[in-house]
Amino acid sequence: MNDGSDAVRDFAARDLTALAGGGGLDAGSPVGEVAGRLGADPAVYGRHFLGRPPQETFWCPATVGGFGGPVKIWFRDGRVVKIEGEWPELTPDAVAALGPPDAELDYLRDVAIVPEGEKVWAAHGFAVKMNRSGRQVIALSVFPTTTVEGFEAGIRGAGDYRESPAPGA
């Protein structure tokens, strides 16, 4: 089992088996330490919101081999909330081999809803976003272990929620 700090290494290696067997990121990991491991500068950051209700959260970019898109180290009060990378070199078969996730959540990709496309293993501290057809892995994230409710409350992107239909609609 990972000691938590190994989650950064396993994330960078896109090692789903190790992530599934580990304990997620260390809760309270200092952003400077994690950013240093991924070659990022926490003094260069953006601002957005995570959780429900939305909580102000900052992110610093990192370039990590094996990801075709940006990697963001999300932090709040100097502590890492999650690391998320887009277009990881992963196959849908590698995701399927993990077995059922704790939750399959709808998420918003640009302007389209991807039903049940976010596969969350909250108890192991990681999640994978798939495209609408399930044939491409869009993103990989790692975070401290939690519950599905905890993931939605403090880790999940605030823009990933869709409004419930009006009663009677």
Image: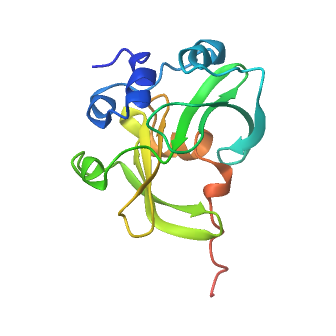
Q: Where is the C terminus found, in terms of image quarters?
A: bottom right
Q: Residue at left 65%, top 20%?
A: 79
Q: Is residue 17 left or right of residue 168?
A: left
Count of numbered labels shown in the rendering: 0
Residue placed most toward the observer, 25 or 71: 71
Residue visible at 44% across and 44% down in the picture: 88
x, y percent for residue 162: 63, 66
x then y, percent, for residue 92? 31, 55
Residue 165, quarter of the rendered image: bottom right
User: Is residue 38 positioned above or below 104 on the image?
Assistant: above
Please state which of residues 133 and 48 is positioned toward the viewer in this rendering: 133
Image point (57%, 18%), residue name: 34
Q: How is the image coloured?
A: rainbow
Quadrant location of the N terminus?
A: top left
Which x, y percent locates residue 157?
63, 48
Which picture quadrant has residue 122? top left
Name the outermost residue toward the bottom. Answer: 169
Residue 12 location (% of width, % of height): 44, 28
- Against 152, residue 166 (above or below) is below
